[in-house]
Image (spheres, rainbow, N blue to C red):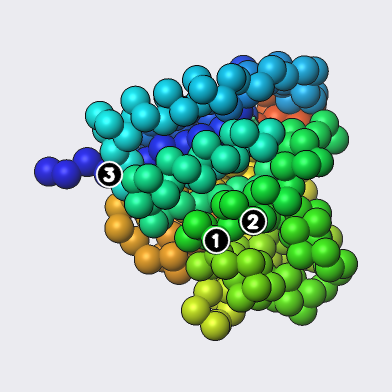
Amino acid sequence: MTIPIALTIAGTDPSGGAGIQADLKTFHELRVFGTSAITAVVSQNTCGVRSFVDIDPALIEDQLQAVFEDVPPNAVKTGMLSIVPAIEITAKILKQHGVSRYVMDPVMVAKSGHSLLSKEAVQSLITMLLPLTYVTTPNIPEAEIMSNMRISSLDDMKKAARYLVDDCGAFACLLKGGHMSDENAVDVLYSEGGFETFSSPRIATKHTHGTGCTLSAAITAELAKGKSVQSSVETAKAYISAAIEDSLQIGHGNGPTNHWAFNDRLSNRA
Ligand SMILES: Nc1ncnc2c1ncn2[C@@H]1O[C@H](COP(=O)(O)OP(=O)(O)OP(=O)(O)O)[C@@H](O)[C@H]1O
Ligand SMILES: Cc1ncc(COP(=O)(O)O)c(N)n1
C-alpha cells in the first residue's frame, strides 16, 4: 500500500485552531500522513495573536531538506511565510524537487487583525510562488491585494481569480467567499479557462478560527491522494462546512472548527 504524504510549510498556533496544528489535524482526518516545516513560532489563541518569531531561513531550509530526502511529499501547502527569505527558500525547494501539486494559501492577516506577512513579502509571493502554484486559495482581502482589484460581487471574484491564473501563472485559483455577507458561503474556482462555484449555507457562528488553513490543508490532502483539483476542492468544501457547522466552543474568542465532523457524518451515513 502506498501511503499519501502531505507537507505543510507554515506558522504555529499553540491553541490548536490554525496554522500547522490545523493542517496536521486535517491531513490526519483525511487519512494522509502529515509532515511539517515551521516558518514562525506564533504566540496566539482564540482571542488573537500576541507576538511571533520568524524561524532562521537556514533552519527552514534544513527542515524542508530533511522531509524531502526521507519522506518526499505527494503534495505541499504553504500558509504563513512571513518574510521574503522564507518565500525564496520555499520557491527554491519546490523547484529543486519538481513539486507540481503545490497549494498556496496566501496568509496575510489573522482574523484578529494581526499581520502575518511583511509588506515587502506580498510581491515575492506573487512573483516567486504563484507561477509554481497548482491551487491558490486567497480570501477576499488577500485576492484584492494580489490582484489590485476591488471585490464586492461574484463577478468581481471571477475577474480576480482569472487574473491570478491567466496573468500571474497559478494553475488554478479558489477564491473564498467567507468574507462576503450572502446567505451562502460561495467559493469560486477558476482553472483551465472555466469557472465552478462551491456553495454551502452560511453558518451564523463566530467560531471560525483557522477555516482558511483547514480548507487549503484539505485540498492538499486530496491532491496528495492523486485526486483532481475539482474533486479535491469538493471534498475540502464538505470538510470545512461540516467543521464550521459543528465548530467547538473552546476558548474565550473565535473558537476552532471541528475536525471530527466530516468523518462523523460519513460514518453516520454508512
Ligand atoms: N460562516 C460560514 N459559514 C459557512 N462557511 C464559511 C463561513 N465562513 C467561511 N466559510 C467557508 O470557509 C472557507 C474559508 O473561507 P474564509 O474566507 O473564511 O477563509 P479565510 O479568511 O482565509 O480563513 P482564516 O483566515 O480564518 O483562516 C471557505 O470555504 C468559506 O466559504
Ligand atoms: C500560524 C497561522 N496561520 C494562519 C492563521 C490565519 O487564521 P485566522 O485568520 O483564522 O486567524 C493564523 N491565525 N495563524
Label 1 secondary element:
helix
Q: Tell me if residue 176 comes above or below residue 209 in the rendering.
A: below
Q: Tell me if residue 59 comes above or below residue 22 in the rendering.
A: above
Residue 179 visible in the picture: no
Could you say where residue 40 lies in the image, as x and y percent from the top left? 62, 23
- The amino acid sitting under disc 1 is Pro
Pointers 2 and 1 in contact (CB under 8 A)? yes
- The amino acid sitting under disc 2 is Thr
Question: On the rendered image, what quadrant is the N terminus found in?
Answer: top left
Could you say where residue 85 lies in the image, as x and y percent from the top left? 62, 33
Name the foreground residue: 221 vs 186. Answer: 221
- Tag on residue 131? 1
Could you say where residue 51 lies in the image, as x and y percent from the top left? 77, 17
Label 2 secondary element:
helix
Q: Residue furthest left?
A: 1
- Of badges 3 and 2, the one in the foreground is 2
Which quarter of the figure has residue 10?
A: top right
Q: CA distance from mark 2 to mark 1?
A: 7 Å
- Tag on residue 127? 2
Could you say where residue 90 lies in the image, as x and y percent from the top left? 51, 40
Upstream in the sequence, badge 1 or badge 3? 3
Disc 2 crowd, CA 10 A, few/some/many (<14, 14-19, 20+): few
- The amino acid sitting under disc 3 is Pro
- Tag on residue 4? 3
Disc 1 crowd, CA 10 A, few/some/many (<14, 14-19, 20+): some
Q: Residue at x 74, y 33 (%)?
A: 116
